[in-house]
Amino acid sequence: MVIVMKPGVSQEKIQTLVAQLEQDHGVTVGITNGVGCSILGLVGDTAHIDMDKLSMNDDVERVMRVQEPYKKANRKFHPEDTVVDVCGVPIGGGRFTVIAGPCSVESEDQITGVAEDVKAAGASLLRGGAFKPRTSPYSFQGMGADGLELLLEAKAATGLPIVSEIMAPRYCGLFEEKVDLVQVGARNMQNFDLLKEVGKLSKPILLKRGLSNTYEEWIMSAEYIMAAGNENVILCERGVRTFETYTRNTLDLSAIPAIRKMSHLPIVVDPSHAAGMYWMVEPLAMAAVAVGADGLMVEVHNDPPRAKCDGAQSLTPEKFRHLMDKLNPLVELMGKKLV
Ligand code: PEP
Ligand code: MN
C-alpha cells in the first residue's frame, strides 16, 4: 500500500503517522521524501487496513493499493492451477468438465431421465435446482428438500455427482449431507453470512458471478469462503447485466482469461443463463471452450416448453448431444481433456 502525503506536511506529523501504522497494523513503513511531498510505502499484510479511514486523515493526499486484497484466491501466492475434486470428478488443471441438467428438479422421471441423457452425451455432473431464487414470489419456488431426494435417486441411477443451489445458511446441514457440489447463485454472491457458512462445509462450492459484480468483488466472495476454511471453490461466469436487453445477460468472456491471471481457482461458464435463449447456448459454449474455460454448466430439459423454470434457455437432450459432439474436437484442440 502506498500513501501520498499532502505537500508541506511536517516530518514530525509523518513520523507520528508512521509509528501509528507500524504499531496498529504490524507493517513496516518506508518514507520517500520527494520534491514537495512525501510518499509512504507500507510493506507487510495490508489486507486489514481500511483505506477509506486513512484517506480521511487531513494530511493524506491519496491512498493506493499495490497488492490485491485477496490472498488465498490469489495466483501470486499459488501459481499452479487448483483442481477441485467433486466426488471423484476433477474440475480445473487442463481438464474440461461439463455440468448439465434442468434448471429445476420437477419429478423423479424428469430428473432421472435427463440425468441418463446427459450422462450418455458426456456430462460428468448433474445439476438441478431444488431451492429456486425466483424474481416473482408467485413463480415455482422449487421442490425444496424433496427435490434433493430426487437428485439423489438420479445419482444412484447414473452415478453422476449432483450440483444444487443453496439459498440460506439454515440449509447448510442438509446440503452437507446430500449435495456433492454446493452452488451459490448469482443473487447470493455477496450474501456474506451465507459465504461464511458454506466456508465451513466439507463440500466444494460453485460460486456464480453476481448480476453486476466486478472480477475483484467476485474473487473477494471466493476469499470469504476460503478464509472460513473451504478452499475448494469453483467460479462460474453466467453473464452480467448490461444495457443490452436482447439477451438475458451479456456473457463476459473476458472474465475467463482475466480470472485465470488473477486467481488459481477453476472457472466454468454457464451459457444458458447468459443467453436466456436455447439457440444461443451452443455458440457461446464453443466460445467458452476457445477462451480457456475449465468447463460448462448447461441447462437441459426433457420438455422445454413445459419446464417449470427457464424452458426458453434449456436444450433438449438431442440438442445437448449435438453440442457435446461439436465441443469435443475443440476441447482437444485447446489441449484439454473432456472429463
Ligand atoms: C441457476 O443456475 O439455476 C441459477 C438460478 O443461476 P444464476 O444464479 O446464475 O441466475
Ligand atoms: Mn435456471
Image (cartoon, rainbow, N blue to C red):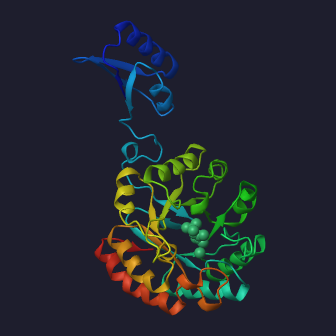
Q: Where is residue 99 shown, x and y percent of the image? A: 53, 74
Q: Give the camera-side residue of 50 and 23.
A: 50
Q: Is residue 183 above or below residue 122?
A: above
Residue visible at 62% across and 51% down?
195
Whether residue 144 is visible to the viewer of this picture, yes or no, is yes
Which corner quadrant holds the C terminus? bottom left
Q: Give the camera-side residue of 58 and 264.
A: 58
Whether residue 302 is visible to the viewer of this picture, yes or no, is no
Quarter occupied by residue 157: bottom right
Q: Where is residue 92 shown, x and y percent of the image? A: 43, 63
Q: Where is residue 203 shown, x and y percent of the image? A: 62, 58
Which quarter of the frame holds ligand 2?
Answer: bottom right
Q: Is 18 positioned to the left or the right of 167 in the image?
A: left
Residue visible at 64% across and 80% down?
309
Q: Where is residue 65 shown, x and y percent of the image? A: 38, 35
Residue visible at 49% across and 68% down?
238
